Image: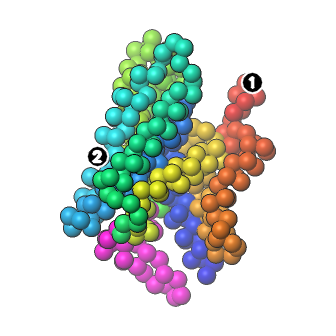
Amino acid sequence: MLLEQIINGITLGSIYAIVALGFTLVFGVLGIINMAHGEIFMFGAFIGVTVTSTLGLPIWMAFLAAIAATAILGYLLEQFALRPLRGKKGVSHLAPLISTIGVSIFLENLSHHLFGAGNHPFKSSFAEIHYTIGSITIYLVQILIFVISVILMIALSYWLSKTKAGKALRATAENLETASILGVNTKQIITLTVIIASAMGGIAGILVGMAFNSVNPQMGLSIGLKGLAIIILGGMGNVKGAMAGGLILGLAETFIVAYGDSGYRDAIAFIAIIVILLIRPQGLFGKKTSEGRP
């Protein structure tokens, strides 16, 4: 029983980690919380439902369709909701955050019109494949979710530290004006960052649909808020922190449901935010600046 709950917790935490990686990318470059990320994730899940359940196509096509659709949403988000506000004189630093909140509300209402309200079954024969070891049942989708989350974290870390585009992104995150003077196409880098983060949200949406066999238009808000909790827990802008924070939150929620009161499951994320902000404001893996701030 304990081992099964650990496996379930790692599976849930891996999904949270993928969502948090998208938050981390955008925050690291733009310094804002993209509150529309949860709804982009939700659209990815619904694309998966459409491809697998409605059209009857294989799951790998659902992944490709979700990545393409959410990447387009990320591009449109950056072009029409973020770029017009960037660098404008007299514009509050909260304006981009409010803009993404507006986009999230729009996407949630759009999903109601396109896909309908309520739960939608995610039918995939792949999600039913499982292995029994003694009294423990492990689903192949659980292994896939963990492997994909680790691959994404390693690939993202490598891309940021070893590639020319990754170094340009880090330079843009450090100081946008200086990076621009040094020849970095900061507009292109910012657009690429939002697109990659959104595509990762699409991947997470498909994985959630496969893991829980159901998606709904409200799932984006819950996942989005937990993604925010995770990047605060792990350290704002820290890739490894996002992965670790996701696993910690996933395991905590799973054990609360299994051995405690399931009614407190969603409260765990926000209790974690309060505790971390009080004890270690920079997060578990974050570093303090020279001014002593995270």
Q: Tag 1: residue type?
A: Glu
Q: Quadrant of the C terminus?
A: top right
Residue found at the far right of this picture: 279
- Residue position marked by numbered label 1 in the rendering: 291
The coloring applied to the image is: rainbow
Q: Is residue 42 visible?
A: yes
Kind of element beneath mark 2: helix
- Residue position marked by numbered label 2 in the rendering: 68
Residue range highlighted in magenta: 122-145
Image coordinates for residue 272, horizontal then vertical, percent: 70, 52
Q: Quadrant of the N terminus?
A: bottom right
Seen from the viewer's position, the closer of residues 151 and 174 is: 174
The answer to which quarter of the image holds residue 158 is top left
- Residue at (57%, 24%) from the top-left corner? 93
- Residue at (47%, 32%) from the top-left corner? 99
Badge 1 local density, few (<14 within 10 Å), some, or many (20+)? few
Q: Is residue 189 magenta?
A: no
Left or right: 81, with 254 as reference point: left
Instruction: State the mark number for residue 24.
Output: none
Q: Is residue 129 magenta?
A: yes
Left or right: 177, with 236 as reference point: left
